[in-house]
Image (tube, rainbow, N blue to C red):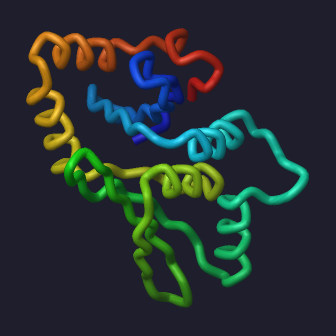
Amino acid sequence: MKVKGLMIDPMTQMPIIVLKAPEGDAVLPIWVGLFEANAIALQIEHVSTPRPMTHDLLRSLIDTLQARVEKVVITDLKENTFYAEIHLAHQGGKVKVDSRPSDAIALALRAEAPIFVSEDVITRARKVEMTRDVAESDRWRQWLEKLDPEDLGKYEM
């Protein structure tokens, strides 16, 4: 998946990371906190800060330990909460680290690592949408599938 953009949910005023499959029409919105959205926005906009932000520090620490972020994976969806893992390569071995999706995505952007989403998560996320009011769910899904870069403002990827 690629970060298609960041936007604000007009209903809750919470930031949403919009992930989209490079091929196909799979779209996954993930609601995140303001600080997490800011960390992602800074990287999307290539803004450097005078002192390292948390995700910059984490990347520096990984680099200093001679490890590498191989990928991040959104692995699960439980009770409307997404779960993720950061996959690291270190000293010829592999390490998985539990993470919030927003932190994993912020780190992946900094490390230029790919972002994956389990097919099961995409399927279950669609089912969660289906359980909401059907008209609202259909409208929301159609809107996400037809996202135009103009709709996402300056955070379009």
Q: Nearer the viewer, residue 78 or 98?
A: 78
- 77 to the left or right of 102: left
Above or below residue 38? Residue 108 is below
In the rendered image, the residue lying farthest to the front is 12
Above or below residue 131? Residue 118 is below
In the rendered image, the residue lying farthest to the right is 50
Rendering coords of residue 114 (x, y %): 47, 53
Going 64% across and 75% down the picture, which residue do you hit?
62
Rendering coords of residue 92 (x, y %): 50, 88
* Count of all numbered marks drawn on residues in the image: 0
Rendering coords of residue 150 (x, y %): 54, 9
- 24 to the left or right of 100: left
Above or below residue 119? Residue 100 is below
Asked which quadrant contains residue 73, the reply is bottom left
- 52 to the left or right of 121: right
- 45 to the left or right of 156: right
Q: Nearer the viewer, residue 145 or 7?
A: 7
**Quarter the N terminus occupies:** top left
Above or below residue 64? Residue 130 is above
Going 65% across and 46% down the picture, which residue do you hit?
39
**Quarter the C terminus occupies:** top right
Going 49% across and 66% down the picture, which residue do you hit?
70
Asked which quadrant contains residue 153, the reply is top right
